[in-house]
């Protein structure tokens, strides 16, 4: 029988909410259970209201659940905000010293007092983790193993404090009545828990990226933070630039010199990078940019999620030039999308942009451990080095494919030129109309070949009455919502886009023809629907849109579909 438990841990920023979630996730992973977690936090260092939503199951998960079975309220505000969302058989654990007699499903636990008795209030989150684990069926030995791994190098006193605090939490958690439980016997497996940010970092390293210039901007910064963990082990350079303009131009310069380069940012930072993006397009210099979307405009909601940069990313920069745009749907998809972005960017000498968002960057999910960092890359550089200046190496040579032979400065006797102005085949600035036409057509010769590299959207349940149609991080929630509706007898399928631009739109038209499309995405104007209509002439039937800065949960999709159907 499938067991599925959702836990919401909430409180003020700085109360160790994520620490509790991380401890729970590690214990569950050791037992071979599957998890999906996501953070919701305000853009402030302390105070406010934040929460960690953790779902644990005996089967693989694709999305979180916003209806918790266990609500852990580290402060009163969390209880007030979320008490009405707790499932009918759920319980609430309140961080409180008062022994109030309330409903039978509300339990008061003095977390700070128990931690202080163990040796220090700072370990109150470990008390909470122990209590929750005991409630869902774990023994102290399961937590003890994880605590020893985490605190062994922090000194004996810190380890002993957390062991005592965890045991105290487990003892009190055993007294709480909860109808669900999980099996925590350790099992051998090849699963790991990974965030989208780490998957993106590993994808870049697996693609042999060596240079990572960036300027910090939430939620793109965690990608670089995960890369920094490998800085002493691998031949790579991470450089914090003075702003996003400098970061993208540093990436372009390094790529021109032969080093695979990537920068990550969010929508506001991507705006600043646009002139650099155009420079990469004109000079035909491969670079990869990750745009971890958040709500705007301007500063918007700095720590929230959105899918509102789709059309902007496809059309960004003055004038026209080809580029790749990818939107991975989950953690493992992110790893492969980033690798693919590097491969195709270098093959076609164009920029590649990977669209993520705060939800995908920060959420963690159980995946099979297939993430390998190795020398898995192919070079598309011109291998002939015996070319002299007098032989007039043509950096922008006209070819049948539009792809010119690319050389690295100082790696041969050829003079390698690049110009941000329109230029001749040699790379010299030139303004004649005929040359302009020739070079524009040369760059766009690549477009048809680029289309063939991209995968068309996946269609599930081909004979359905209507299709939930989504892109990027909405994938998991759409799949779960679709499966639940099908169990209820609703004849729904789903269509997922992950390779976005450029697609073969004639083939896409044949895929979508005669299908009733319900677009699901995190913006206010149904951007995917607009793109489909523009490129294929196919209009969508309806849409499920969400633009409040929070993720699209399966329950939200189901509720909106029922309203559309008049149920």
Image: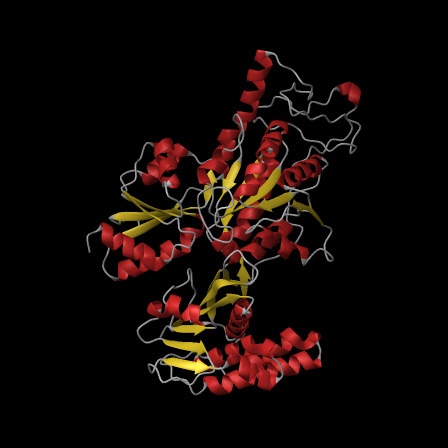
* Residue beneath the point at 36% across and 66% down: 67
**Figure label count:** 0
Instruction: Give the side of residue 446 with respect to residue 408, left or right.
Output: left
Residue 149 placed where, x, y %?
A: 64, 75
**Quarter that holds the C terminus:** bottom left
Instruction: Give the side of residue 196 with respect to residue 238, left or right.
Output: left
- Judged from this view, the residue extending furthest toward the left is 566
Can the viewer see residue 479 in this picture? yes
Residue 443 placed where, x, y %?
A: 56, 25
Residue placed most toward the observer, 486 or 222:
222
- Picture quadrant where residue 106 is located: bottom left
* Residue beneath the point at 61% across and 12% down: 432
Name the colour scheme.
secondary structure
Above or below residue 37? Residue 102 is below
Residue 169 placed where, x, y %?
A: 51, 83
Above or below residue 489? Residue 447 is above
Residue 555 placed where, x, y %?
A: 33, 59
* Residue beneath the point at 41% across and 81% down: 107
Can the viewer see residue 332 in this picture? no
**Quarter that holds the N terminus:** bottom left
Residue placed most toward the observer, 170 or 500:
170
């Amino acid at each position: 029988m499938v067991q599925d438990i959702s836990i919401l841990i909430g409180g003020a920023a700085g109360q160790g909410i994520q620490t509790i979630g991380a401890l729970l996730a590690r214990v569950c992973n050791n037992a071979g259970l599957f998890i999906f977690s996501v953070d919701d936090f305000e853009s402030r260092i302390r105070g406010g209201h934040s929460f960690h939503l953790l779902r644990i199951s005996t089967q693989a998960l694709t999305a979180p659940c916003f209806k918790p079975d266990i609500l852990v309220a580290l402060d009163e505000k969390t209880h007030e905000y979320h008490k009405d969302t707790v499932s009918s058989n759920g319980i609430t654990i309140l961080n409180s010293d008062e022994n109030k007699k309330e409903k039978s499903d509300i339990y008061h636990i003095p977390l700070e007092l128990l931690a202080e008795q163990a040796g220090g209030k700072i370990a109150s989150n470990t008390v909470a983790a122990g209590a929750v684990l005991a409630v869902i069926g774990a023994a102290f030995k399961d937590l003890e193993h994880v605590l020893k791994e985490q605190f062994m190098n922090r000194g004996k006193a810190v380890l002993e404090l957390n062991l005592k605090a965890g045991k105290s939490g487990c003892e009190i958690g055993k007294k709480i009545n909860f109808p669900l439980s999980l099996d925590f016997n350790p099992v051998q497996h090849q699963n790991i828990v990974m965030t989208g940010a780490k998957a993106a970092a590993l994808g870049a390293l697996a693609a042999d990226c060596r240079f990572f210039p960036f300027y910090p901007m939430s939620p793109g910064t965690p990608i670089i933070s995960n890369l920094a963990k490998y800085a002493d082990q691998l031949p790579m350079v991470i450089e914090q630039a003075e702003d996003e303009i400098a970061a993208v131009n540093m990436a372009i310069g390094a790529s021109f010199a032969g080093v695979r380069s990537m920068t990550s940012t969010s929508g506001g930072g991507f705006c600043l990078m646009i002139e650099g993006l155009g420079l990469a397009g004109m000079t035909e210099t491969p670079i990869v940019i990750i745009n971890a979307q958040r709500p705007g405009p301007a500063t918007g909601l700095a720590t929230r999620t959105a899918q509102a940069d789709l059309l902007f990313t496809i059309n960004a920069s003055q004038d026209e030039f080809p580029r790749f745009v990818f939107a991975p749907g989950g953690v493992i998809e992110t790893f492969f999308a980033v690798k693919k972005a590097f491969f195709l960017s270098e093959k076609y000498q164009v920029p590649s942009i990977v669209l993520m968002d705060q939800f995908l960057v920060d959420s963690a999910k159980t995946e099979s451990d297939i993430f390998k960092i190795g020398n898995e890359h192919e070079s598309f550089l011109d291998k002939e080095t015996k070319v002299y200046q007098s032989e007039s190496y043509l950096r922008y040579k006209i070819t049948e494919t539009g792809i010119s032979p690319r050389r690295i400065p100082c790696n041969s006797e050829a003079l390698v030129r690049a110009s941000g102005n329109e230029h001749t085949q040699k790379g010299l600035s030139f303004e004649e109309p005929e040359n302009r036409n020739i070079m524009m057509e040369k760059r766009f010769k690549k477009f048809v070949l680029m289309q063939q590299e991209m995968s068309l959207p996946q269609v599930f349940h081909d004979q359905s009455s209507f299709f939930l149609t989504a892109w990027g991080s909405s994938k998991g929630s759409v799949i779960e919502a679709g499966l639940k509706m099908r169990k209820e007898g609703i004849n729904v399928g789903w269509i997922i886009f992950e390779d976005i631009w450029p697609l073969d739109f004639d083939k896409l038209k044949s895929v979508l023809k005669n299908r009733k499309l319900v677009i699901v995405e995190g913006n206010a104007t149904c951007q995917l629907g607009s793109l489909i209509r523009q490129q294929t002439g196919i209009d969508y039937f309806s849409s499920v849109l969400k633009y409040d800065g929070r993720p699209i949960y399966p329950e939200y999709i189901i509720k909106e579909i029922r309203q559309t159907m008049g149920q």
